[in-house]
Image (cartoon, rainbow, N blue to C red):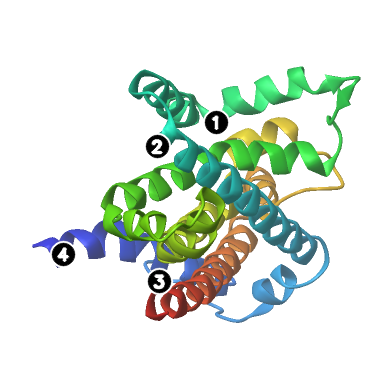
Amino acid sequence: MFGLVVAVVFVAPLATVVAAGLAGSWTGAVPSDLGFEHFDDALTGESLASLSVSLQTAFLAGGVALVLGTWAALAARECPPWLARVVDGVFHLPIAVPSVAIGLGLLIAFNEQPLLLGGTRWIVILAHAVLVLAFAFSAVSAALDRLDPAYRQAAESLGAGPLRVLTRITLPLLLPALGAAAGLAVALSMGELGATVMVYPATWKTLPVSIFALTDRGQAFQAAACTTVLLVVTLLALVLLGRIRGRAALR
């Protein structure tokens, strides 16, 4: 029953998207005039540029979120309990707020000097970083909760200072969790649309925005091909990050 639910709810819609990307027309129960014309268009011109923008945005925003989320998770463990709860609530706030509200807020807040980011790529990267920051913070916080304090205590008993404990004990033990957090951040950023639509400039259009524009113009087959490319590239990025995480776990 579980396999059937997964097939109907998850596999079938994705398979339909792939089939639509291959279709030249779809007037009956199955697509017809199958070919790779739409995929050729998806890998050239504006669509390819949007894919490049999505990858750059995802890795930059994911990196920023990973650094800030790890820093906050480590700092929260050294705070008084009440302050740790405040930090936890602040970093989880983007999950509770609609992404459109995040985008609008950033657009208004950073649309004047001295922090004029509106109309630049940086406001898109900032919006993505804010949205994925909560997930990076949660992943690292959960890993810290599972970390055996005996390692840290042993290092401190041997005379290691806080910085040495952090760089030689804590962070190496957190590498698998950091890899998982990075993968989640990149995957979420690659598919983000709500906040991006509010803030993106014409020179920094992500692939989800291009897909939305294609569907809005009635070019559903082309949008399906671009969506398939987005899925494949996201999976490849996750596989790459997964291999890095696996090597870190073995070490």
Q: Count the labels in the image.
A: 4
**For the residues marked 1 and 4, what is the alpha-carbon distance in whole angstroms?**
32 Å
Taking depth in this image into account, of 84 and 139 the one nearest to the observer is 84
Q: What element carries label 3?
A: loop
CA–CA distance in space, label 3 to label 1: 36 Å
- Given this view, does label 1 or label 2 mark the residue nearer the observer? 2
Disc nearest the viewer among 4 and 2: 2
Question: Who is closer to the viewer here, 98 or 141?
Answer: 141
Label 2 is placed on what type of residue?
Arg
Dot 2 falls on a residue whose secondary structure is: helix
The amino acid pointed to by label 1 is Ser
- Taking 5 as reference, is 135 above or below it? above
Q: Residue 30 carries which label?
A: 3
> First in sequence: mark 3 or mark 4?
4
Q: Which residue is drawn at 45% across and 44% down?
A: 135
Residue at 40 percent across and 69 percent down: it is 15
